[in-house]
Image (tube, rainbow, N blue to C red):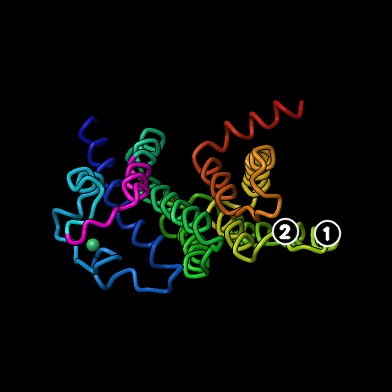
Amino acid sequence: MIFDYIVVGILGLIVGSFLNVVVHRVPRRESIVTPGSHCPSCEHSLRPWENIPVLSWVFLRGRCHGCGAAIAWRYPALELLSGLLALVIFSQVWLTAKLPLVLVFTWILLALTLIDLETHLLPDRITKPGILAGLLLNGSVLFWPSVALTSPLNALLGVIVGYGCLWLLSAGCHLATGRHGMGGGDLKLLGMIGAWLGWQAILLALFIAAISGGLVAVIYLLSGKGRDYAMPFGPYLALGGWLMLLWPEQIIHGYMHILM
Ligand SMILES: [Zn+2]
């Protein structure tokens, strides 16, 4: 039992280390396979002991072994977060056929969140294969029923409803204010969430995104940090999708409770 947690936690840390590579390279249109991990300042290739999640950063005191350049704290932070999320997921899903799917979907959402925060982009290189993966996965119910998160039809409708919902919102926003409220990446991200979770999850994922994003926007405005700051919406959509992935019944129940 404790051993299972340790294995899953370490897996989360290692994938977190890989996510750092994805977050850094995908927006720059670089390969995520070659070259191996290296220091962006001096090109020093990381030896295995310099590439251990979190621990290497601590041993190296946050500096490159080659040139002494500071290694941002967000690298070990993402590794820790990925490990932590893996533990939370394991405590909810246990060793079932769904565990790898839930982990992979979480890591995709996590990578997109960080890329959007950093670059204000949600790369097609992740969202489009993500949509396809969700459709294939839920389509595999015909051969492998224990794996699917929803039915193939619900998944297909999920893409249409997810993409369509935000397209309508975005078009309405454009008509009303003359400004584009959302980028195309947001539409594809919600379409991807629909492909994995089914159309039923879309509305509540969007609701959570609007509430959490709205709260952060209010905090930004109150703190006087620029009215013109275009806040990325992807992280909030990802949060909504992730919560609907893990706790759909509780969220539906809570939502009904608010309505009544
Ligand atoms: Zn260096």
Other-residue count near label 1 (Cα within 10 Å), few / some / many at <14 / 14–19 / ≥20: few
**Residue type highlighted by circle 2:** Gly
Callout 1: SS:
helix
Image coords of residue 141 (percent x, y): 47, 56
Ligand 1, seen in the image, is in the quarter at bottom left
Residue 193 location (% of width, % of height): 56, 54
Percent of width and height locating residue 241 = 56, 47
The answer to whether residue 204 is visible is no
- The span picked out in magenta is 66-83
User: Is residue 249 one of those drawn in magenta?
Assistant: no
Q: Is the residue indicated by label 2 positioned so its CB lies within 8 Å of ligand 1?
A: no
Q: Is residue 79 magenta?
A: yes
Q: Position of residue 62 (x, y in %)?
A: 26, 48
Q: Residue at x 28, y 46 (%)?
A: 13
Quarter that holds the C terminus: top right
The residue drawn where x is 52% and y is 69% is 124
